[in-house]
Image (cartoon, grey):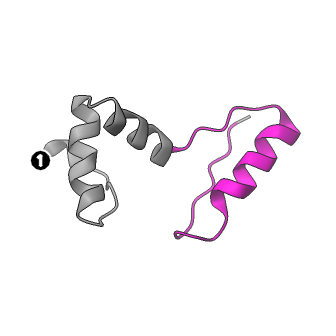
Amino acid sequence: MRLMIIGPQGVGKGTQSALLSQALGVPHICTGDLFRSHAAARTELGRRALEFMNAGDLVHDGWAAR
């Protein structure tokens, strides 16, 4: 099963995703968590994503082309 939950910040995507993950027994993968994890580990991906996050921007599609 594959579900994608999208929406603006603060609408409960993470909360609902965690509940669905537990109820359905499927993994919960959050791109924000992945970016923060890479930023903490100081990987190349994390450093590049951190540029957006520190500027208060969302990490958008096509960012790797920068």
Dot 1 amino acid type: Arg
Regarding residue 43, the answer to whether it shows in the image is yes
Regarding residue 62, the answer to whether it shows in the image is no
Residue 4: image location, x then y, percent: 62, 49
Residue 29: image location, x then y, percent: 59, 38
Which type of secondary structure does the marked residue at label 1 adopt? loop
- Residue lying farthest left? 66
> How many neighbours does mark 1 have within 10 angstroms: few (below 14), some (14-19), or many (20 or more)?
few
Q: Residue at x 67, y 65 (%)?
A: 12
Q: Is residue 49 above or below residue 60?
A: above
Q: Is residue 45 above or below residue 58?
A: above
Q: Residue at x 57, y 60 (%)?
A: 6
Residue 16: image location, x then y, percent: 74, 56
As rendered, which of 32 and 7 lies closer to the eye? 32
As rendered, which of 37 and 13 lies closer to the eye? 37
Q: Is residue 3 above or below residue 27?
A: below
For this view, does 53 lie left or right of residue 16? left
For this view, does 27 lie left or right of residue 54? right
For this view, does 39 lie left or right of residue 27? left
Quarter of the image for the N terminus: give it.
Answer: top right
Say which quarter of the image contains residue 48. Answer: top left
Q: Residue at x 33, y 29 (%)?
A: 41
Magenta residue span: 2-30
As rendered, which of 38 and 30 lies closer to the eye? 38
- Residue located beneath label 1 in the image: 66
Q: Residue at x 63, y 55 (%)?
A: 5
Is residue 15 within the magenta segment? yes
